[in-house]
Image (cartoon, rainbow, N blue to C red):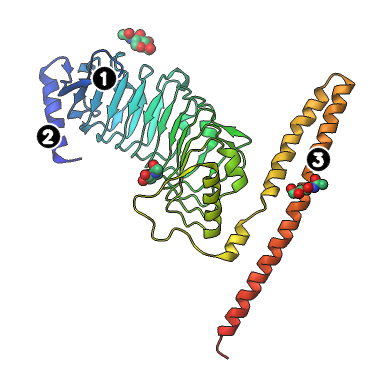
């Protein structure tokens, strides 16, 4: 907080002392997105515990507060907002905790010091756009019942642990940005879907591993995993999880060269745009054959695992069939699936054997060449 703030707090307090009701004056009017009336920009809004709130009134239009100091935008302060204010932006005001009013539709609280978000009931909230980037949030679980959300951005906070299940109920979510946090991995229970999600930003985290085996992002078109710690991704699950992908940013990861090329070939084949970085990375991948082999699981293994899981549905269908003929047909279908999977298992075992012998050879070569260089 700079000196200007303190002066203005002083002014606010003295202003309040000689006027009964104090309406924040609009510095500028622009066009609001929701109200027919205009959007009002407020400056130097200072609200602290000593502010006599019953005298404070915000104008009944969309509000943008770009300077001031409001460490606690609590329920009492939120109640001073008009029901007509649908869009609220508060930036650079040192907000540490906020109360979201039920009547708001769009909230932008970027560049504050937020660590706590409160509301009466998540189900009653109408907010569909929520921007909370550049704050001090450690946890994203407060969003889990905000079912109206379409755009959610939580980038550049200090979130380190996250589960996909946090977003399970957000069936309308189209954009999710959780870049610039401290996330190492995101876990999920059972099969996880976000049916409407089109854009997923995970850049600038610490992910060493992108666990995809239980995810299904059928509508995601844009994916950004740049500036993480990824060496490799599982190709089978990558293809299965993101069937509608149009563009991916994979720059600035310590990729294994063999694995990266494989991923790029796959993207080429599927017509997925491989976004180039504006600042090209100094090293685009690391050459390590031993690692390449070790990081390659035969895709058949993942496919079989997936198939076996699917087989349970066929089994359930078989049991629920009424007629004997129908049940028999389902049984035959199961047998043919099993035959296919048995063959695939065989192929996978052969590949694993090859891989093991390849690894063995590489390892032997390495130790022998090292021995060669050793002075006797
Ligand atoms: C404002 O909205 C709340 C919640 O929707 C409602 O309970 C309240 O009566 C409204 N106030 C006015 C003045 O319309
Ligand atoms: C991916 O995210 C990074 C970091 O936020 C950004 O610099 C980059 O432009 C993004 N890539 C694309 C294709 O938008
Ligand atoms: C087993 O799988 C391989 C490779 O997928 C295929 O070429 C072969 O024809 C299959 N054999 C049988 C008996 O299905």
Of labels 1 and 3, earlier in sequence is: 1
Q: Is mark 2 within 8 Å of ligand 1?
A: no
Q: Which residue is mark 3?
A: 338
Of label 2 and label 3, which has the lower sequence position?
2
What's the CA distance linking mark 1 and mark 3? 61 Å
Q: Which mark is residue 32?
A: 1
The reply to whether the residue tagged 1 has its Cβ within 8 angstroms of ligand 1 is no
- Residue ID at (62%, 42%): 213
Q: Is residue 236 above or below residue 51?
A: below
Q: Which residue is mark 2?
A: 7
Picture coordinates of residue 215 (x, y %)? 58, 37
| Direction from residue 117 to residue 194 in the image, left or right | right
Q: Quadrant of the N terminus?
A: top left
Separation of residues labelled 2 and 3 (CA atoms): 77 Å
Q: Along the horizontal axis of the image, is 178 left or right of 97?
A: right
Write the residue at 53% across / 55% down: 261
Q: Are marks 2 and 3 in contact (CB under 8 Å)?
A: no
The residue at the point 58 percent across, 91 percent down is: 376
């Amino acid at each position: 907080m700079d000196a200007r703030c303190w002066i203005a707090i002083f002014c606010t307090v003295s202003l309040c002392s000689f006027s009964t009701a104090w309406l924040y004056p609009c510095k500028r009017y622009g066009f609001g997105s929701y109200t027919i009336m205009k959007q009002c920009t407020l400056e130097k809004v200072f609200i602290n515990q000593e502010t006599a709130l019953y005298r404070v009134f915000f104008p009944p239009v969309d509000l943008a507060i770009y300077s001031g100091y409001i460490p606690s935008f609590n329920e009492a302060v939120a109640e001073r907002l008009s029901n007509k204010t649908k869009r609220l932006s508060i930036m650079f005001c040192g907000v540490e905790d906020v109360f979201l009013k039920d009547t708001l539709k769009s909230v932008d609280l970027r560049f504050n010091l937020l660590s706590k978000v409160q509301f009466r009931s998540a189900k009653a909230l109408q907010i569909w756009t929520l921007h909370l980037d550049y704050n001090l949030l450690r946890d994203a679980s407060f969003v889990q019942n905000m079912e109206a959300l379409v755009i959610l951005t939580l980038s550049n906070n200090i979130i380190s642990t996250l589960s996909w299940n946090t977003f399970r109920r957000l069936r309308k979510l189209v954009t999710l940005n959780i870049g610039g946090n401290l996330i190492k991995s995101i876990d999920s229970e059972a099969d996880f879907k976000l049916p409407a999600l089109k854009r997923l930003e995970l850049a600038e985290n610490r992910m060493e591993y992108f666990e995809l085996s239980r995810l299904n992002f059928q509508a995601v078109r844009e994916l950004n995993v740049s500036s993480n710690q990824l060496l490799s991704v599982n190709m089978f699950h990558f293809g299965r999880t993101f069937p509608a992908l149009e563009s991916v940013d994979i720059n600035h990861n310590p990729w294994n060269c063999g694995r990266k090329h494989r991923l790029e070939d796959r993207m080429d084949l599927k017509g997925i745009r491989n976004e180039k970085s504006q600042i090209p990375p100094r090293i685009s991948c690391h050459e390590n054959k031993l690692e390449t082999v070790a990081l390659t699981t035969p895709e058949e293994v993942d496919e079989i695992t997936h198939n076996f899981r699917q087989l349970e549905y066929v089994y359930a269908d078989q049991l629920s069939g009424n007629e004997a003929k129908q049940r028999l047909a389902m049984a035959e279908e199961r047998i043919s699936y099993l035959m296919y999977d048995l063959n695939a298992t065989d192929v996978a075992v052969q590949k694993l054997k090859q891989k093991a012998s390849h690894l063995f050879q590489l390892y032997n070569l390495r130790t022998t060449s090292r021995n060669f260089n050793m002075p006797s």
